[in-house]
Structures are given as C-alpha cells and as structure tokens.
Image (spheres, rainbow, N blue to C red):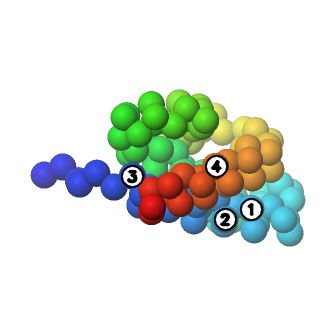
Amino acid sequence: MREEIRNLERLEHMLEAINVLINYKESHSLEDAQADPVVYFGLVKHVEIIGEAVYKLTLDYRARHTEVNWGDIERMRHVLVHGYYKIRPHQLWQTIVEDIPNLKPIIERLIQVEKN
C-alpha cells in the first residue's frame, strides 16, 4: 500500500535536518567532522534526509513552489545514497555552510503556509 501524501510532514523533516546541520556547523569545522567518521556520515545522513523528503513531496507541490530548486536537492540525495563513494567532503561542507542556511527560512515559511 502506498503511503499517504504528507507534504507538511516532509517539510518538517527537512527543517529538523536543517537545524541539526546548522547547529553542528556553527561550532565545528569540516576537519572536526572528518576526524570522526560517525559524525561525518551523520552529516551526510542529514543532507540525505533533506533530499529524501524532497523526493517524497508531491510533484504538484514542487511545481507550485519554484522558489526552491527541488531538483538540485533531489540529485544531491541520489549522489549521497547511490554514489556514496564519490562524495567530496568539501562540496558537502559547502552545501552545509552556504545552501542549508539559505534553505531554512524558505522551508519555515512553507511550513507556516501549510499549517494555515
């Protein structure tokens, strides 16, 4: 049986993962993350969660909210899951430092819209 459509819950999952990533990067560096493989792959997993949540959003929802480049997020998820051996730590960290903080206010706004 297919899962019931839950765009709001997917957005909330994204925000939870975003907050974890932002909190980590505010007090740590890429070198800190790389020094502990469990921490490093925990960061990878949280970026994956964001991508998986995007992947599970309805296509209609994504089409109505073009302010987010959903396709890029989904493609990164595919690389992290299926091309794990190709992950470049500096690119991952750049995503965490630059892209994730910019995504947060958009996702927060979309959550508020969905709740109203």
Q: In which quarter of the image is residue 73?
A: top right
Counting residues from the start of the chain, the first of labels 4 and 1 encountered is: 1
Q: Is residue 109 above or below residue 98?
A: below
Of residues 95 and 84, the one nearer the viewer is 95
Reading the image, the residue beneath label 2 is 19
Q: Residue at x 45, y 61 (%)?
A: 116
Counting residues from the start of the chain, the first of labels 3 and 2 encountered is: 3
- Three-letter residue code for mark 3: Asn
- Three-letter residue code for mark 1: Ile
Asked whether disc 2 touches disc 1, contact meaning CB atoms under 8 Å apart, the reply is yes
- Residue 106 - label: 4
Reading the image, the residue beneath label 1 is 22
Asked whether disc 3 touches disc 1, contact meaning CB atoms under 8 Å apart, the reply is no
Q: Is residue 110 left or right of residue 91?
A: left
Residue 17 locus on image (x, y percent): 59, 61
The residue carrying pointer 4 sits among few (fewer than 14), some (14 to 19) or many (20 or more) residues within 10 Å by Cα, namely: some
Q: In this view, does 1 lie above or below 82?
A: below
Asked whether disc 2 touches disc 4, contact meaning CB atoms under 8 Å apart, the reply is no
Q: Which residue is drawn at 23% across and 54% down?
A: 4
- Residue 91 - label: none
Instruction: Give the structural element (helix, strand or loop) at label 4.
Output: helix
Asked whether disc 4 touches disc 3, contact meaning CB atoms under 8 Å apart, the reply is no
- Three-letter residue code for mark 4: Ile
Counting residues from the start of the chain, the first of labels 4 and 3 encountered is: 3
Counting residues from the start of the chain, the first of labels 3 and 1 encountered is: 3
Q: In which quarter of the image is residue 104?
A: bottom right
C-alpha separation, residue under disc 3 versus residue under disc 1: 22 Å
Q: In this view, does 110 lie to the left or right of 101?
A: left
Residue furthest to the left: 1
